[in-house]
Amino acid sequence: MGGHRGGRGAWRRGATVLAAVALAATAGCSSTTSTGGSMDPREQLAQRPTFEQAEKGYLALLGELRDIVDAQQPGLRWNEAEPVRSDRGGCGAPFDRVDGAKNGNYTFDGAEGAVEDANWTKAVDAMKAPLAAQGFTEVTVLQDEPGAHEVSVGDPATGARVVFGTKAGTILTLYGACFLLEQGS
């Protein structure tokens, strides 16, 4: 099962940060103000948590989701002890011209072994509550065939999404939203 077992406490400690991230992100994502005018993209991002705060929340969520997968499908061997971050090319519109805006992807890019068909629905169902608690509510089934499954769950407020899939191996990836870096970062 690998080295991720010792890090579970860190995932759990991140849950409080994750809740704050989700509340701030969903509260600050409207593209219009209460008076009906357009909100400046920098102002939208300023109402979200910082990139660093969001990253902590994302890592906590991924750890919780991996624990759920492990509970539903014992015996998977994850290739990474911690999620790996890769930076995307930059934020998309309307945040692509905001200085200090950043996003990233976080992945457990593979586990040796697949989630068995009999356990797939149980794993996805068990993930729904922690995902929904953090604003990830838009479920899209990308593939659902015997031996090959993939689902995407998006956060409509920020555009972030989690992809969980299994075939010969298993993947768990979070494609992050755009946030402002902390000052001086």
Image: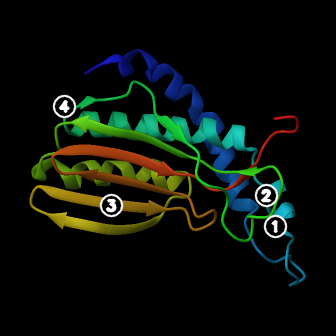
The residue to which callout 2 is attached is: 45
| Count of number-bearing discs | 4
Q: What is the CA distance from the residue labelled 2 to the residue labelled 3?
A: 28 Å
Neighbor class of circle 3 (other Cα within 10 Å; few <14, some 14-19, many 20+) is: some
**Residue placed at 43% from the left, 41% from the top?**
107
- Residue 109's tag is none
For marks 2 and 4, the one nearer the N-term is 2
Q: Position of residue 163 (x, y in %)?
A: 39, 55
Q: Label 4 belongs to which residue?
A: 74
Residue type at numbered disc 2: Leu
Q: Are marks 3 and 1 in contact (CB under 8 Å)?
A: no
Q: Are circles 3 and 4 on residues that touch, CB within 8 Å?
A: no
Q: Residues within 10 Å of mark 4 (few under 14, many from 20)?
A: few
Q: Where is residue 78 shown, x and y percent of the image?
A: 29, 30
Element at label 2: helix
| Residue 176 horizontal side relative to residue 94, left or right | left
> What residue is rendered at 11% in x and 53% in y?
117
Marks 2,1: beta carbons within 8 A: yes
- Three-letter amino acid code at the position of disc 4: Pro
Check disc 3 and report the residue beneath it: 151
Q: Residues within 10 Å of mark 2 (few under 14, many from 20)?
A: many
Mark 3 or 4, nearer chain start: 4
Taking the image as shown, residue 14 lies to the left or right of residue 36, namely left
Q: Which residue is mark 1?
A: 41
Q: Nearer the viewer, mark 2 or mark 4?
A: 2
Q: CA distance from mark 3 to mark 4?
A: 20 Å
Task: Name the amino acid type tagged 3.
Answer: Val
The disc, 3 or 1, on the residue closer to the chain's N-terminal end is 1
